[in-house]
Image: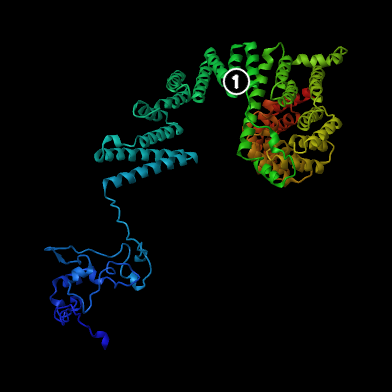
């Protein structure tokens, strides 16, 4: 109790009970309703502030706490700063927010932390695009035009030229509508020139593909005359190509030259192609000197196989031997630009490397290399055969010069092919009789009086002998060359009925190259000549397995089946061959003959009629058809075909005999006597 007793100091002269009733107005709850400042504070966020604790530093820690014994002070002075909403010096302090950024009172109540507001769900959907706006209509129409151009190009690549043209026309119509709409909505500068160019160019291309050349030229003119299209002058090359197809060579050259003038010199490849077109056009017009100038310029700037070959043709046309030789050497010197075949050979037994090599052995790059090499060989072989008879005094000397040039070039493997071709050419060139006489002179000089048939046989034998000697030089070459030479030797000996030699060289050809269908066919022929038809059929089958387009093997196996009396198999072979060779008289005759052997005269007569439509002067086919009609009892038709056969070949005793008997049956004895007298003279 004594702790509440306060002794008055002796020096204090004041009232002992002064300050007893003083109190802190903070605890005055009775007058809070009338306190304007307090009510205003309650309405602000200050009244929702959490209570201050000892752990939170605040200005309230530094202020004195009033007690019951303290002096009476106001609330504003005890806080140490103006209260929110309090009136100070007659001015009300503005109320402020004390909520922290990114936090809410819900966070203080234990809710999950979500400052980005992801718990509020997905965003509302975007506003729908207005399809009726002019800009949107233009955008959709432009998209449709692009789709039509693409569809036109795809149809052209698939070979449907008519559909490609229709799509191109539709794209052109829609593009014109698009241009008008753009002019109404925007300024003319915003027109899509690239789209207009692509539509017109595609339309002109489709017109040209459909051989509608006037329409294509008009469309190209629209593009070329429009100065807003950059590099449109190059399209004059296309116009020149159209004039070339129309054989309007003067205009073709004119447009080629205009295109050449508008193409910068830095585009060398394009300029070379245009100059090559100009040279070809000059050749077609017979202006060989101008063509020579074009091709010589190309061969000096960027030599290629086509230009080199055309240059040889131009020199051949003017008859310049020395220039032909130089042009052939330039053609041989053109780089092939293909890698060596060594990259397709595995250097080791690495499985991964072997797998890669197997994958690239027949890829598109390898196929392109083969095509380029085949094209080069074709140009060189053709050029050699063309100039060989004229560059020297004789064909042989000219061919030898070409062979020597090829041997010293990068196409050294072509030398063997050229020499084999040389030997075969000796067989085909019937006017080179001097070679035959040179090699058979020792046989002819001892003959006093020989029939012409024997002399011709000797000539052919000597001619073949020269070819044989040429081909024998290749017996020690590599396998492919050896196989080709041995195949030709086997064929020559087979023609001379020397079947032992033919069989020997056929074996050499097959052993050198087992996949050579010609070698297998020749081997089958030698076996067929010895009467072993089953074994011959096996060789023919193997040749067909290696090359299904080997018509010789297919024909021979049909003959073999006929010998074996397997008529159904033989007929199947000849019908397949007829599908390949539609107008082959030999195939048609074999089919008719097989139907005759199968005792089906109606089919035999039908196929013989097809044969006569191909060779109407074949007396044997006419007599055969007459015999079939005679066996069917149709004497009038038989007489017609027998008489036609007699007219084309009046020395057939059987036909004359039938005609004489026919006139006897019809009681025209005078006619019959004439035919029998002719038959007696022939006998």
Residue identifier under label 1: 308
Q: Is 667 rendered above or below residue 380?
A: below
Closest to the observer: 47 or 566?
A: 47
Closest to the observer: 453 or 487?
A: 487
- Farthest residue to the front: give it: 10
Q: Quadrant of the C terminus?
A: top right
Closest to the observer: 151 or 436?
A: 151
Q: Position of residue 370 (x, y in %)?
A: 64, 33
**Looking at the rendering, which quadrant does residue 172 occupy?**
top left
Q: Is 205 rendered above or below residue 311?
A: below
Residue at image position (19%, 69%) is: 76
Residue at image position (43%, 33%) is: 205
Q: Is residue 572 visible?
A: no
Q: Is 523 rendered above or below residue 112?
A: above
**Looking at the rendering, which quadrant does residue 233 occupy?**
top left
Left or right of 504? Residue 626 is left
- Farthest residue to the bottom: give it: 1
Left or right of 156? Residue 370 is right
**Looking at the rendering, which quadrant does residue 413 occupy?**
top right
Q: Is residue 398 visible?
A: yes
Q: Position of residue 581 (x, y in %)?
A: 64, 36
Q: Position of residue 53 (x, y in %)?
A: 32, 72
Q: Quadrant of the N terminus?
A: bottom left
């Amino acid at each position: 109790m004594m702790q509440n007793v306060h002794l008055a100091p002796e020096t204090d002269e004041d009232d002992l009970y002064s300050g007893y009733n003083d109190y802190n107005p903070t605890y005055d709850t009775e007058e809070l309703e009338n306190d304007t400042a307090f009510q205003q504070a309650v309405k602000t966020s200050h009244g929702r502030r959490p209570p201050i604790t000892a752990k939170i530093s605040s200005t309230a820690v530094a202020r004195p706490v009033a007690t019951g014994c303290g002096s009476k002070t106001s609330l504003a002075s005890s806080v140490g700063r103006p209260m929110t909403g309090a009136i100070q010096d007659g001015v009300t302090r503005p109320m402020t927010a004390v909520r922290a950024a990114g936090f809410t009172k819900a966070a203080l109540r234990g809710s999950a932390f979500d400052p980005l507001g992801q718990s509020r769900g997905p965003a509302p959907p975007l506003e729908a695009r207005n399809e009726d706006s002019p800009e949107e209509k233009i955008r959709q129409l432009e998209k449709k035009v692009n789709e039509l151009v693409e569809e036109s190009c795809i149809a052209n690549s698939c070979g449907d030229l008519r559909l490609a043209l229709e799509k191109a026309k539709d794209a052109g119509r829609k593009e014109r509508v698009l241009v008008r709409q753009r002019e109404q909505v925007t300024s003319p500068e915003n027109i899509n020139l690239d789209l207009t160019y692509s539509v017109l160019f595609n339309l002109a291309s489709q017109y040209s593909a459909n051989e509608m050349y006037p329409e294509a030229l008009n469309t190209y003119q629209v593009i070329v005359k429009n100065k807003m299209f950059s590099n449109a002058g190059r399209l004059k090359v296309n116009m020149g190509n159209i004039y070339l197809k129309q054989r309007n060579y003067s205009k073709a050259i004119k447009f080629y030259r205009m295109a050449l003038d508008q193409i910068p010199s830095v585009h060398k490849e394009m300029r070379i192609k245009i100059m090559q077109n100009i040279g070809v056009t000059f050749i077609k017009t017979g202006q060989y000197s101008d063509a020579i100038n074009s091709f010589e310029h190309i061969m000096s700037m960027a030599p290629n196989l086509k230009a080199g070959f055309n240059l040889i043709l131009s020199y051949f046309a003017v008859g310049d031997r020395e220039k032909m030789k130089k042009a052939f050497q330039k053609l041989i010197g053109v780089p092939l630009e293909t890698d060596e075949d060594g990259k397709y050979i595995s250097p080791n037994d690495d499985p991964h490397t072997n797998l890669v090599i197997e994958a690239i052995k027949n890829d598109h790059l390898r196929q392109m290399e083969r095509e380029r090499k085949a094209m080069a060989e074709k140009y060189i072989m053709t050029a050699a055969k063309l100039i060989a008879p004229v560059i020297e005094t004789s064909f042989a000397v000219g061919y030898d010069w070409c062979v020597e040039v090829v041997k010293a070039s990068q196409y050294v493997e072509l030398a063997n092919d050229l020499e084999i071709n040389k030997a075969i050419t000796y067989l085909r060139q019937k006017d080179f009789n001097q070679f035959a006489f040179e090699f058979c002179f020792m046989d002819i000089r001892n003959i006093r009086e020989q029939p012409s048939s024997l002399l011709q046989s000797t000539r052919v034998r000597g001619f073949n002998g020269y070819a044989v000697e040429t081909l024998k030089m290749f017996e020690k070459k590599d396998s492919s060359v050896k196989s080709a030479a041995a195949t030709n030797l086997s064929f020559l000996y087979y023609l001379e009925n020397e079947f032992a030699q033919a069989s020997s060289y056929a074996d050499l050809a097959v052993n050198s190259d087992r996949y050579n269908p010609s070698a297998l066919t020749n081997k089958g022929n030698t076996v067929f000549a010895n009467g072993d038809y089953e074994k011959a059929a096996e060789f023919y089958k193997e040749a067909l397995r290696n090359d299904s387009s080997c018509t010789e093997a297919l024909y021979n196996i049909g003959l073999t089946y006929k010998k074996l009396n397997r008529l159904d198999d033989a007929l199947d072979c000849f019908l397949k061959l007829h599908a390949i060779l539609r107008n082959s008289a030999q195939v048609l005759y074999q089919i008719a003959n097989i139907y005759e052997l199968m005792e089906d005269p109606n089919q035999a007569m039908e196929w013989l009629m097809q044969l006569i439509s191909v060779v109407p002067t074949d007396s044997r086919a006419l007599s055969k058809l007459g015999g079939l009609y005679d066996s069917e009892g149709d004497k009038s038709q038989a007489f017609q075909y027998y008489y036609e056969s007699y007219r084309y070949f009046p020395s057939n005793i059987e036909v004359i005999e039938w005609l004489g008997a026919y006139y006897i049956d019809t009681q025209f004895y005078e006619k019959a006597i004439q035919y029998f007298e002719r038959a007696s003279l022939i006998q």
